[in-house]
Amino acid sequence: MLLSRLAAVAAVFGLATCNAVSVNALRDHERPNIVFIFSDDHSTAAISAYGSRINQTPHLDRIAAEGMLFENTFCTNGICAPSRAVILTGKHSHLNSVPTNAERFDGSQTTFPKLLQAADYQTALVGKWHLKSDPTGFDFWRVLPGQGEYYSPDFLTPEGRKRYEGYCTDVTTDFGLEWLDERDKDKPFCLMLQHKAPHRSWMPGPDHLTLFDGEWIPEPDTLFDDYTTRSTPARAQEMTISDHMYLHYDLQVPPTEEEARDLKGPDRAYERLLDRMTPEQRAAWDAAYEPKNAAFREAKLEGADLVRWKYQRYIKNYLRCIQSIDDNVGRVLNYLEENGLAENTIVIYSSDQGFYLGEHGWYDKRFMYEPSLRMPFIVRWPGVTEPGSRDTHLVQNLDFAQTFLEIAGVEAPAEMQGESIVGLMRGEEPEGWRESIYYEYFEVGIHAVEPHYGVRTDRYKLMHFHRVDEWELYDLPNDPDEVHNLYGLPEVEELTAELKAELTRLREHYRVPGA
Ligand code: SGN
Ligand code: CA
């Protein structure tokens, strides 16, 4: 369409359509679109394409079957706002203004959406944002305030705040697809569709309230981890299913009259969240949960039995939230097909970091252990990613910005610290690809995870809890659950020295202050 318009303009002015113009126009038309679907806290252990033992995700699996699955994608700092800031800027947390969830993102920084916009891409952001300042670099944005709500979510736009009826994962997708309908069809686009789900407090949508009822979801081997050989931070955290999960807010069991008189912490928000439902939604919710809750009260569980019950309730709700994401991924894939966009649109699925699904007895993230360090990353790029292929290189969210820029044919600023993975997507073996990744975690507060930094190679992981000067070292192929901390054993002395040297090198390379 654009080409014919240019030809018409040229005809009006009596000009020959000059080559440069047509080439540019053609390039503009052919530059691939990007749909980046990004969720919050989705562990690879809950995606069947990654070998989940606990659920099926047919639409995510379809992206993998028609594209490439990255087996080794890791976050640089395993919580929400920091991960998002790293993705936008292509810089580590110590350089991008958001080391923890507490800071406000400095929106005057260079980000990949701004650079795409300058290269005539249309850019849109819908859903969870969590960076406090207004989004910059987007032609269109409609974001959840803070963490957002599952039912009848409020959204912020440049015009203000408005509440929308529906379930957040569906509503977010609706907004993304509506924007695709309304966009300028002559320009390439980048749509970031960012779900709140499956973030705490794991409230499933109306379509999945009874999914997994009557089933027993396998427990992780380390549900009753005793933390022997581990450092003190592994014991001192406050994210256990046994002691740090709230019966009402987290597990959806309403308080008895007596309990209601003395609600603590997030349990005080429980009723408020349910109150957001429409009467129909509330009726469906009560019909689904009341019998299960009555059985729970009746059973009067204690000790390990209670922990097991909590795990089942938690994991089922978490997986129900994911099922809605998967359904909505299916909607997006269908939309692209029905609108002739599938061939020239790169579809990516990822999440801000992983999550503990009972491993080490935990929920939440933050630690550099595998379940939360790993991010899902699945890409379908027709004609580029070989269907059903898998990549094992060490990739990080630090690489996303440069990747998107290369896709769009835009040069990345030298200050960005990642590497484009377009070559990996093509199945190439890039020379000198990184052999280790750097991780850092800064937040002090909720869940009491001690700040730390570390290095991971394809085989080993060395972590340093620097404030308490404690270390952990794991041999991952031989100890995939990370329960045998080898640090300090005489047989790993040389290895430890090598990993420490690598850690120092990385800290200097990434310009960590004080390195
Ligand atoms: C909230 C949650 C925490 C969670 C953080 C960060 N508590 O504070 O459990 O670790 O968000 O999550 S809640 O009571 O509000 O649910 S993040 O994904 O945004 O980093
Ligand atoms: Ca998160």
Image (cartoon, rainbow, N blue to C red):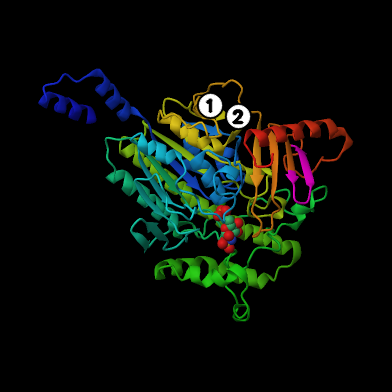
- Name the residue: 43% across, 37% down: 347
Instruction: Decide: is 198 above or below 266.
Output: above
Say what amino acid the circle numbered 2 marks: His
Number of labelled discs?
Answer: 2
Q: Quadrant of residue 406?
A: top left
Q: Earlier in the sequence, mark 2 or mark 1?
A: 2
Which residue is disc 1 drawn over? 424
Mark 2 and mark 1: span between their CA atoms? 8 Å
Residue at the front extreme, as displayed: 514
Q: Which residues are magenta?
A: 464-475
Instruction: Decide: is 155 above or below 4.
Output: below
Please indicate whether residue 512 sits to the left or right of residue 469 in the image: left
Query: Considering the numbered disc 1 on the image, is that residue within a helix, a strand or a loop?
Result: helix
- Name the residue: 48% across, 45% down: 38
Q: Please state, as top left, top right, bottom left or bottom right, where the N terminus lies in the image.
A: top left
Please indicate whether residue 251 sits to the left or right of residue 230 in the image: left
Residue 497 horizontal/vertical position (percent): 80, 33
Residue 144 painted magenta: no
Q: Residues within 10 Å of mark 1 (few under 14, many from 20)?
A: some
Q: Quadrant of residue 118?
A: top left
Q: Are marks 2 and 1 in contact (CB under 8 Å)?
A: yes
